[in-house]
Image: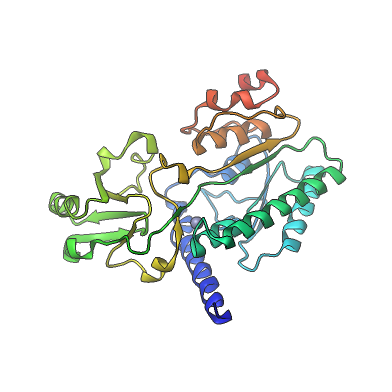
Amino acid sequence: MFIGEEANKQLLVEKLIQKFIRENIARNIDVHLEVYWSSSESTANKHSSLYYVPGCDVNIDGILSRYCTPYDHHMTHEKEVWAIEDALKKLKSHRVDIAYILLWKVDEIGHLYGPNSAQVRDAVLEVDTHINDILDIIEDNQQNDVNVIIVSDHGMSTIDTLHKINISEALDMNDILEITEEGTQAYVWPKSGKEEEVYNKLKKFHPNMKVYHRDDILDRWFFKKHTRIPPIFITVDKGWYLAHPKSSDEVFKWYGNHGYDNNNQDMKGIFAAYGPDFKSNKTVAGFRMTDVYQLICKVTGIKPKPNNGTWSNVEHLLNDADLKDEL
Ligand SMILES: [Zn+2]
């Protein structure tokens, strides 16, 4: 690979993340999305410091994180070390109660080279070393009262570059108000009166594609009731890539993606935790991403907002069984 080619790939990812911040997170102001930093800032007077989290500077219902170090595409280990040292200082002096640090390298390399690539293996080893350094810093600071949660928000599947579904042929864009997302899913808003026609064309278009009316979206995705969910939702089988008239063909240069059905083993993330509130040396059965929010709320003393988590899935991770009474 030429150096220029590598730089182009990096630029592509940076452009896409900026687009994600602009078009997704920044729009949340109108839908009152509950995110962890708005929970902590709005309830029980807890404060947060976020490092490199895309959109952490977004005002949600008038609430901002107390500290936000914006997303930085030119991440280095030195910056991560600075973030953990800064977080520990702020925790110690009670300026904040929670700190979040995003380590996004494995995700980026996974998209660019595929999850089974040598590059991903190297990135995982590198991040693993960095996490070890972070834990050493916490230990050196003797902050024994800090709970640490290490969690990935998704897994990743290899995209088969021959498995592309382009729904452009099935769509008359005169019937479409808006179509968004791409790759693993598409959100379709047909014009008034066109919903059934658009649905029927899409439904029989490709055997590796599943098309849902909003009401038929699977309950286990905890997805269909939100105002942003479109009248027609499309997802594709693992390893397939979905394109449409408004999608950017650049993304098809990816070799890995997430957003397929979460029943696929590839989509599972990781979870590890340690600290005074957590049991040690315990391996537990898998639980869902929707359960993590209330766990974070619990160890930081925040009353969770309504959510789709199931407390019994995670309460056994904690040392103090009485903690659950506070929920
Ligand atoms: Zn990603």
- Residue 92 in the figure: left or right of residue 244: right
Camera-nearest residue between 161 and 96:
161
**Residue 154's x, y, as percent?**
51, 47
Does the image show residue 40?
yes
- Residue 130 in the figure: left or right of residue 109: right
- 211 is higher (above) or lower (below) than 113: above
**Residue 59's x, y, as percent?**
55, 54
**Residue at the spot x=73%, y=45% of the render?**
96
Where residue 162 sits, quadrant-wise, is bottom left
**Residue at the spot x=45%, y=41% of the render?**
265
**Residue 304's x, y, as percent?**
56, 32
- 172 is higher (above) or lower (below) than 216: below
Q: Quadrant of the C terminus?
A: top right
- Residue 108 in the figure: left or right of residue 222: right
**Residue at the spot x=42%, y=51% of the render?**
30
Camera-nearest residue between 17 and 21:
17
Q: Quadrant of the N terminus?
A: bottom right
Give the image's coloring scheme.
Answer: rainbow
